[in-house]
Image: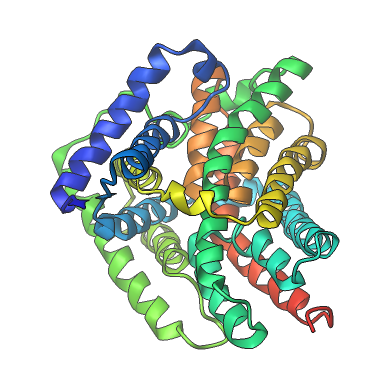
Amino acid sequence: MVSLDTLETLMAASLVLLLGRWILARTPILRAYSIPEPVVGGLLVALLVFALRSALKIDVRFDPGLQVPLMLTFFATIGLNADLAGLKAGGRALIVFLGAVVGLLVMQNVLGIGLAWALGQERILGLLGASVTLSGGHGTGAAWAKVFAERHGLASATEIAIACATFGLILGGLIGGPVARFLITHYGLTPNPESNSADTTGFEQPKAVRPITADAVIETVALIAVCLAVGSALASWLNGTAFELPAFVCVLFVGVILRNGLAVRGWYQVFEDAAALLGNVSLGLFLAIALMSLRLADLATLALPLLAILVVQAMAMAGYAIFVTFRIMGRNYDAAVLAAGHCGFGLGATPTAIANMQAITGRFGASHLAFLIVPMVGAFFIDIANAIVIKLFLLLPIYR
């Protein structure tokens, strides 16, 4: 076994991002379908690790210690960049998009349970291969797996949940770009001129050169540290209660309150460029570590019925993004970018959604609306909605 420590893992993650950038620069087809840099580099390294383990019996392990801090830092910067006045301006679109998100949660669960029944499997297995792990991700999947194992007797529920969430994370980063590219080219869509003239956030243009001072970075690091400390404490306090929320949701919530509270009182104005810069760095490194650490061997052990369920779920996600999300969000360029983002967190996670949208807007143009509502819906509202939908489906008398 080859185990990399924290610094070696950080070095590897940085090289993965550079590798992804280098490959994209020399591979027109990957650029054409807007596959994000971390996905390209991370999957290539994951495949290499899988090959080393299979052929030479060399097991390479990366230190996962940086993943949670990097993820929390990313969500803290999302909160610090969330101007409630701006969210109010996009309020109707946010509500409509939230409706599309809830519709997908229901569809995933109906599809998962129905396919499990059709394939002669336990229906609870189908629910685990649905919104629990796909829209919910690794954290939600692992949490609900314990319930499925203890109350419904599903053997190896945790291992199945992690494998399903891993499958979704890969597909979420692979299909978002092609879906948006198809919509943009098929309908001849162009960016809204207002998006290009508006004050775009750093998340919309991660490669833009922006003036940032050392003082601004230090101040922003201090705000992020407050978000992480208070948000983690809040998550611990809510743990085990009816209001239990994932730590990243609490961190994002603290960031929103901190940014808008300081602005209302006139005490401090968050330097958005510095927050976005640190957020983009955290996003890239988090996705690189997450993807290069994927245990692809776990996916190889998926039973055929479960693999069939997940493949159909991925196809359904692409179809839903094209025929539902895109249409109800206005059938325009912003709607196409929103569809790419929906693929990201509908199968994987909010960081994947942001990476998908950055890949699209970096090639075709800005979409202020998409970056206004996707981070908040994908990071905050989806977890609450998913928890309610899962609990309602568990009340159905079909698992006995």
User: Looking at the figure, which quarter contains the C terminus?
Assistant: bottom right
Q: In this rendering, would 123 be left or right of 78?
A: right
Which coloring applies here? rainbow
Residue 129 visible? The answer is yes
- Indicate the position of residue 313 as horizontal and vertical percent values: 71, 49
* Number of numbered discs: 0
Relative to residue 75, is residue 192 depicted above or below? above
Q: In this rendering, would 144 be left or right of 54?
A: right
- Indicate the position of residue 250 as horizontal and vertical percent values: 44, 69
**What residue is shown at x 14% (from left), y 40% (from top)?**
214
Q: Which of 228/324 is in front? A: 324
Q: Which of 200/172 is in front? A: 172
Q: Which of 226/50 is in front? A: 50
Relative to residue 187, is residue 382 depicted above or below? below
Q: In this rendering, would 383 be left or right of 251?
A: right
Q: Which of 111/344 is in front? A: 111
Q: Image quadrant of residue 292? A: top left
- Indicate the position of residue 173 as horizontal and vertical percent values: 53, 38
**What residue is shown at x 52% (from left), y 50% (from top)?**
299
Residue 84 visible? The answer is no
Relative to residue 212, is residue 63 depicted above or below? below
**What residue is shown at x 28% (from left), y 26% (from top)?**
18
- Indicate the position of residue 350 as horizontal and vertical percent values: 52, 50
